[in-house]
Every structure is written in C-alpha cells, then in structure tokens.
Image (tube, grey):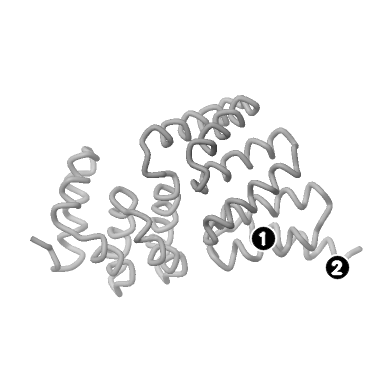
Amino acid sequence: MQMRNGSSELAKLIFKNSADEETLKRLLISNYSETDLAAYLHSKEPLLGRAAGFALRLVGSSKAIPALVDALKNSDRGTRFNAEYALWEIWSHSGDDAVDVMLENGKDLLKNEAYQQAVECFTAVIETDPNFAEGYNQRAIAYFMLEEWSKAIRDCKRTISLNPNHFGAFAGMGHVYVRLGKMDEALAAYKQALVINPNLVSIAEAVLRLRARTQSE
C-alpha cells in the first residue's frame, strides 16, 4: 500500500528507523515506489524533498537519476545536498555485488594512499564490467594521484561517455588540465561540471581563479 500523504509520513518513517538502515530500506520499499520518491524531490515542501533524496540514497536505482540530477538545482539546499549524495551512492552500484565489493576495496586503497594497488583494483573492476562508469572515475582519481595525466584524462572521458551527468568526472578532468597547463580546457571542464551541479563551491572558486589568472596574463 502506497503512503501518499506527504512529508510528515515519509520523514517520520526515516526518523524513527534511521538507526537501522536495513529495516528502513525494507520499509521504504514496502511503502513507497521509486517513482513516488522521485516525484517528491520536486515538492514545494522542503522537508519532503529532503526526505525523498535521503530515501533514494538508500533504495534508488538508475531510474531515479534524471530526477536527482534535476534536484541538484532545487531551491532548497537540503534537497540539493541529499540529491547529490544519492547520485554518488547510485553511481557506486554496478548491479553486481562482487564488482561493488571490488570498487569499495579500491576506494579503501585510495584512502590509504596505495595508489598503484588502487589502479590494479579498479582495472579489475573495469575488466569485469567494462560499462561501469564509476570504475573508470575511481581509476582516474588513482591515476591523478600518481601524476599519470594522460591516463587520468582518458578515464575521465570514458566515465563521461558512459555517464554524461557525472559532474565529478568533469571536475576531475578540469584538475588534470590545470596540471597540464591547459587552462582553456580546464575552464570548459569545470563549467560543464557546474552546469550539471551548481553546488560545487570549490569548482566555482577554481573557475574564478582561472579567469583571474588568464586575464592577468
């Protein structure tokens, strides 16, 4: 039975069960369709939009991506934040549990600064699922840390070809172009990241710095 009576029920459900994520997931799936949650993102009630974004982080699939991308431009900051968080979560799931475990292992290697091992782990992800965009994005990060710029650019471009909404890959490509001294390309990449996700404050600041730098030269 669908619960369609607005923000109070959804927010209450999340609040009461926030300590038990698995139970919360089951309750969300039982009581709300993904279509309903995606529609709630555009509610005039900020609390409902925020709750919907939080719920989609837990139970959303690729079907919710268009609505979540639109929600990155929502007038409510909390809804925008939860939509971005949900997108990253959805992008990190390939549909294959074994691949997802490898991806998380690679991320742990990145955190521990084991960059070459991370490259090898993400390469295994890509070889197992060549159409999983996040495998390329994470490997691009590892290549960036190893200062292997051409490989990082290659993986950013592959990420974007598979997931045109991947603002993180556009931002990462901008960072690489800055390191290569290609400021026009960096600006173009940064701007595209901001077109998709205007909430990237550090990228907006990078654009301002680059513009000031190019104007002074």
Q: Seen from this angle, which residue lies furthest bottom?
A: 44
What residue is shown at x 22% (from left), y 46% (from top)?
25
Q: Residues within 10 Å of mark 2 (few under 14, many from 20)?
A: few
Q: Is residue 210 left or right of residue 54?
A: right
Which residue matches tag 1?
Answer: 190
Dividing the picture into quadrants, the one containing residue 198 is bottom right
Q: Seen from this angle, which residue lies furthest left?
A: 1
What residue is shown at x 21% (from left), y 65% (from top)?
7
Amino acid at dot 2: Gln
Amino acid at dot 1: Tyr
Which SS class for mark 2? helix
Q: Nearer the viewer, mark 2 or mark 1?
A: 1
- Report the disc number at residue 215: 2
Dividing the picture into quadrants, the one containing residue 196 is bottom right
Q: Residues within 10 Å of mark 1 (few under 14, many from 20)?
A: many
Q: Position of residue 129 (x, y in %)?
A: 48, 41
Q: Is residue 22 above or below residue 131?
A: above
Pick whichever of labels 2 and 1 is earlier in the sequence. 1
Which SS class for mark 1? helix
Q: Is residue 113 left or right of residue 100?
A: right
Front-lying residue, 107 or 132: 132
What residue is shown at x 43% (from left), y 69% (from top)?
70
Q: Position of residue 65 (x, y in %)?
A: 40, 61
